[in-house]
Image (spheres, rainbow, N blue to C red):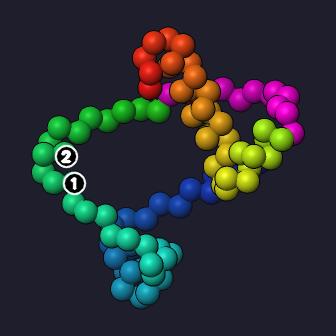
Amino acid sequence: MNKTSTTVRYTLEQIEAKLARGESQTRADAPEAESLGEDFWRDAKVVMPRAKKAVSMRIDADVLDWFKAQGPGYLPRMNAVLRSFVNAKRGRGG
């Protein structure tokens, strides 16, 4: 397994310079997000993601094909479906 990181970090100044040079990788038709407002940031809390465990499991081919057909990110989507099932069985509904 390749453990070389593919994460690239930029400072705000580097990002602004890239944008000024027209090097943005944002699609031209991407919608602008509305401001979340001061209240959101005042009340925001940092939430650390849950630890994940790597597993190997056998899945019916048609089930895997369906998730893959939904596009990139099929494994996180499969995890979300399983998370929803667990929450429903625990009585939390989501």
Q: Which mark is residue 19?
A: none
Name the quarter where the C terminus is drawn.
top left
Residue 81 in view (yes/no): yes
Mark 1 Cα within 10 Å, few/some/many (few <14, many 20+)?
few
Helix, strand or loop under label 2: helix
Foreground: 33 or 55? Answer: 33
The residue where tag 1 is placed is 36
What's under tag 1, amino acid-wise? Leu
Residue at figure coordinates x 67%, y 46% from the top left: 74
65 relative to 21, above or below: above
The answer to whether residue 93 is magenta is: no
Residue 1 in view (yes/no): no
Helix, strand or loop under label 1: loop
Q: In this view, does 88 lie to the left or right of 54?
A: left
The residue where tag 2 is placed is 41
> Residue 17 appears at what percent x and percent y?
37, 80
Name the quarter where the N terminus is drawn.
top right
Foreground: 77 or 88? Answer: 88
The residue stretch that appears in magenta: 50-61
38 relative to 13, above or below: above
Residue at figure coordinates x 56%, y 18% from the top left: 86
